[in-house]
Image (cartoon, rainbow, N blue to C red):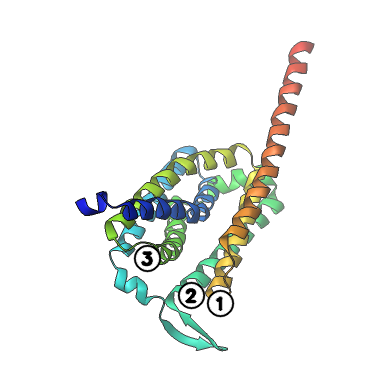
Amino acid sequence: MLELLASPEAWAALVTLTAMEIVLGIDNIVFISVLVARLDPVRAERARRIGLALALVFRIALLTLLSWVIGLTEPVFSLAGHDFSWRDLVLVAGGLFLIAKSTGEIHAAIEAGEEEGAAAGAAAVSFGWTVAQVVGIDLVFSVDSIITAIGMAQHLPVMILAVIIAVGIMYVASGAVARFIAAYPTTKMLALSFLLLIGMSLIADGFGVHVPRAYIYSAMAFSALVELFNVTALRRARRRRGGRITRER
């Protein structure tokens, strides 16, 4: 351990791996934020804490099982000339789940109306079912994240420390994202669109077609920036209306 503290290579690996874990955690943050938006504030905070705690547990557990995780990349069967590993199957299943979940949420919002749908969802949704969904998708993102991390660092303590730092940053960021989505319901539709995009990329990856995450995150960043402009314009319009009402009184 002392040798690692004095090693520039170990520090460089820690910084790089932490940054990578944060970037790969964006998917998880968006998913958790969308799910907890349908719970009341107290249960939403509990679900968010449990979800990120489980993400940390899964990642550390998988890191301690390096040989098993590496084995997940070994082919299990072939179909149409493509070798599928357990990792591929996990990614495909996770992608299908994200697409099904996002499609269902979008359909509910359109059918019932954003405000009515959110109110009905908050009343009907189960805390246990929400946590179960978070657990499932945490596992998908953990497998993908850790397999990537194994190729970037050789020392287990460095990988574990990077995961702990990244999840801590994700915890802080997820609170702000969840509050923003709750305050501005239109951003929920944008977040659900992100999840559809992420789900498609996971399925493509599972079938051996790798879509660079930089392309996906660039599209997400541009869309989020446009939505930020819309939210800013909405805030100013509300302030102007509020000012006119005050002057009239």
What's the distance in space between the residues labelled 3 and 1, CA to CA? Answer: 21 Å
For label 2, the crowd category at 10 Å Cα-Cα, with few meaning under 14, some 14 to 19 and many 20 or more, is many
User: Disc 3, disc 1: CB below 8 Å?
Assistant: no
| Residue 79 rendering spot, x and y as whole percentages | 54, 87
State the image quarter where residue 100 is shown: bottom right
Residue type highlighted by circle 3: Ile
- Label 1 SS: loop
In the rendered image of this protein, does residue 74 appear above or below residue 239? Answer: below
Relative to 142, 224 lies left or right: right
State the residue position of label 1. Answer: 207
Residue 215 seen from this side: yes
Q: Earlier in the sequence, mark 3 or mark 1?
A: 3
State the residue position of label 2. Answer: 88
Please identify, in this view, whether the residue under mark 3 or under mark 2 is nearer the observer: 3
Q: Earlier in the sequence, mark 3 or mark 2?
A: 2
Residue type highlighted by circle 1: Phe
| Residue 174 rendering spot, x and y as whole percentages | 48, 44
Query: In the image, what residue occupies the spot 61% across and 66% down?
Result: 200
User: Disc 1, disc 2: CB below 8 Å?
Assistant: yes
For label 1, the crowd category at 10 Å Cα-Cα, with few meaning under 14, some 14 to 19 and many 20 or more, is some
Relative to 245, 200 lies left or right: left
Query: In the image, what residue occupies the spot 40% across and 80% down?
Result: 74
- Label 2 SS: helix
- Label 3 SS: helix
What's the distance in space between the residues labelled 1 and 2, CA to CA? Answer: 7 Å
Q: Earlier in the sequence, mark 1 or mark 2?
A: 2
What's the distance in space between the residues labelled 3 and 2, CA to CA? Answer: 17 Å
Please identify, in this view, whether the residue under mark 3 or under mark 1 is nearer the observer: 3
Task: Please state which of residues 220 and 121 is positioned toward the viewer in this rendering.
Answer: 220
State the residue position of label 3. Answer: 150
Residue type highlighted by circle 2: Asp
